[in-house]
Image (cartoon, grey):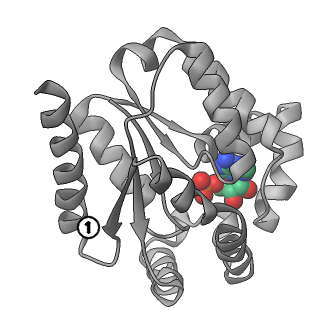
Amino acid sequence: MNLIFLGPPGAGKGTQSAHVAAKYRLVSLSTGDMLRAAVAAGSELGRTAQAIMQGGGLVPDEVVAGLIGEALRGEEARERGFILDGFPRNLAQARMLEDILREAGVALDLVVELRLADEVLAERIAARNAANPSAQRQDDTPETLRRRIAVYHEETTPLSDFYRDKGLLREVDGALPIGEVSVAIEAALDSFLAGAAA
Ligand code: AMP
């Protein structure tokens, strides 16, 4: 099963995709994690990405598509299936992904979108940081967060229509408690799997 997880910053996308990846034994591919690893390693890519990430903007499409293309050419993701967490982030990336998938000979099965109002996002991230200040990400400051949410609205929300038109979109209420969000996501995936097995 090959999935995309869509959702604004703070919607719980990382938590839910990790949970689903473990439960369904999928490979989780997060461009945010890949970029943070590059920053930590101090590579050229990391140096380019760092300032952009701190400002809450998007790293160039070719760069992130290159990271995902490389991962999807690997056997593991193709054999086990995968979750893309944080990619694509705009229509250009969605189109690049179509090319990558065509070349890799794999199809996308579902796109799960976690929906959540902006006010709730800001509250959640503030609560997360208050509960665990040492784990605060450099791009979780109020200013960067505002920018990340704005970028999400401008760049990423058109993907809902893009995937809805293809019949792939499954919307989940991200404001529910974590466990209930997981249940709703699993229901969507299990119904896909039941249809695929029939
Ligand atoms: P995330 O962990 O998905 O919230 O990503 C953290 C930051 O990494 C984002 O705010 C962007 O600066 C960058 N990033 C992650 N994924 C992408 C992507 N697909 N396209 C462009 N930038 C990205």
Pinpoint residue 119: horizontal percent, then vertical percent.
Answer: 51, 90
| Image position, residue 182 (x, y; %) | 23, 58
Whether residue 82 appears in this view of the structure is yes
Task: Tell me where residue 194 sits by quadrant.
Answer: top left
| 183 over 142 or under it: above or below | above
Q: Residue at x 72, y 40 (%)?
A: 40
Residue 89 pos. (x, y %): 65, 53
Residue sitting nearer the eye, 137 or 187: 187
Determine the residue located farthest toward the front in the rendered image: 165
Work out which quarter of the rendered image holds the N terminus and state it: top left
- Horizontally, is 55 left or right of 135 in the view? right
Vertical order, 113 against 46 (above or below): below
Residue that badge 1 annotates: 178
Q: Residue at x 27, y 36 (%)?
A: 22
Secondary-structure class at tag 1: helix
Residue at horizontal 62 percent and vertical 15 percent from the top: 103
Q: Would residue 171 be found to the left or right of residue 161 on screen?
A: left
Q: Amino acid at mark 1?
A: Ile
* Residues packed near mark 1 inside 10 Å, few (<14), some (14 to 19) or many (20 plus): few
132 or 46, which is in the foreground?
46
Percent x, y for residue 107?
A: 45, 26
Give the vertical position of 5 relative to 67 (above or below): below
